[in-house]
Image: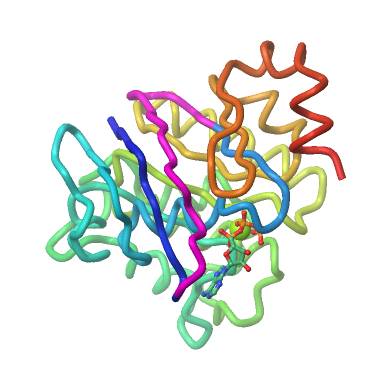
Amino acid sequence: MIEVTDMHAYYGKSHILQGVTMNIQEGEIVALLGRNGVGRSTTCKAIMGEVEPKGSVKFKGQEIAGKKAFEIANLGIGYVPENRDIFPGLTTRQNLTLGLKPGQKDGAGRWSMQQMFEMFENLDRRADVEASVLSGGEQQMLTMCRTLMGDPDFIMIDEPTEGLSPQMVQKVAEVLKEIANRGLSTLLVEQKLAIAMDIAHRVYVMGHGQVVFEGTPAELKEREDVRKEWLEV
Ligand SMILES: Nc1ncnc2c1ncn2[C@@H]1O[C@H](COP(=O)(O)OP(=O)(O)OP(=O)(O)O)[C@@H](O)[C@H]1O
Ligand SMILES: [Mg+2]
């Protein structure tokens, strides 16, 4: 589904991504782990074209490095950034509608607004309320649901459980599994090892702008050295 090869990215003169290579197959949940500041979000932004990538990014066999973010979105990649990205003056429902692609009708894709409201009753209760009054966690959910409304084939979700209550974390985990069940591929950026170990099929650990470990959650469990050096604080 997505194949990243020797990807580099810079902020000004800072060389942030130093040759990232990773792939995500259809229906797979892949977790991207690592300490603060190692370049996890930059990896998502570079794939999305929000930061210019050097190297190769192939999506369904097509080279997308160098394309603009909106073109990449239209090809079927969704990105849920770590900062809640809502339109505060619009209602929950209007925010969700804005997730549809140009010309796309609600319900035409894998997800409908009705299903979003069934999955997240908090959003349902606040469907016609300005999104600015939603709690941080609800805004997080809304951002994720809005991205799904665009019916992506591959979704990158940056720290979706940050600041959520344990029940909400559980809910997000269920939705991530449902996303995979519907055949989407997911890149899950997480700080919390537990959720990644629970739902990811494979794990990449990043350190200093490179992948330093690749394997299954079971394999990572066996590698105390990797966890000590690259994950524990
Ligand atoms: N817009 C920017 N301009 C300059 N430097 C940046 C910018 N965004 C991030 N950086 C730097 O790039 C490095 C990687 O940042 P990135 O946001 O990818 O980290 P991360 O792994 O997502 O960690 P976290 O989300 O915990 O901050 C950090 O050193 C950060 O300070
Ligand atoms: Mg980040």
Residue in the picture at 23% in, 52% down: 65
**Residue found at the far bottom of this picture:** 89
* Quarter where residue 59 is shown: top left
Q: Quadrant of residue 163?
A: bottom right
Q: Is residue 50 left or right of residue 231?
A: left
Highlighted range, magenta: 13-30
Q: Residue at x 40, y 44 (%)?
A: 155
For image coordinates 55% across by 44% down, the residue present is: 119
Q: Is residue 134 above or below residue 67?
A: below
Q: Is residue 6 magenta?
A: no
Seen from the viewer's position, the closer of residues 57 and 229 is 229
- Residue furthest front in the image: 13
Q: Residue at x 42, y 43 (%)?
A: 19
- Locate residue 148, reporting x and y percent: 39, 50
Q: Position of residue 46 (x, y in %)?
A: 38, 56
Provide residue 40's location: percent of width, then percent of height: 56, 50
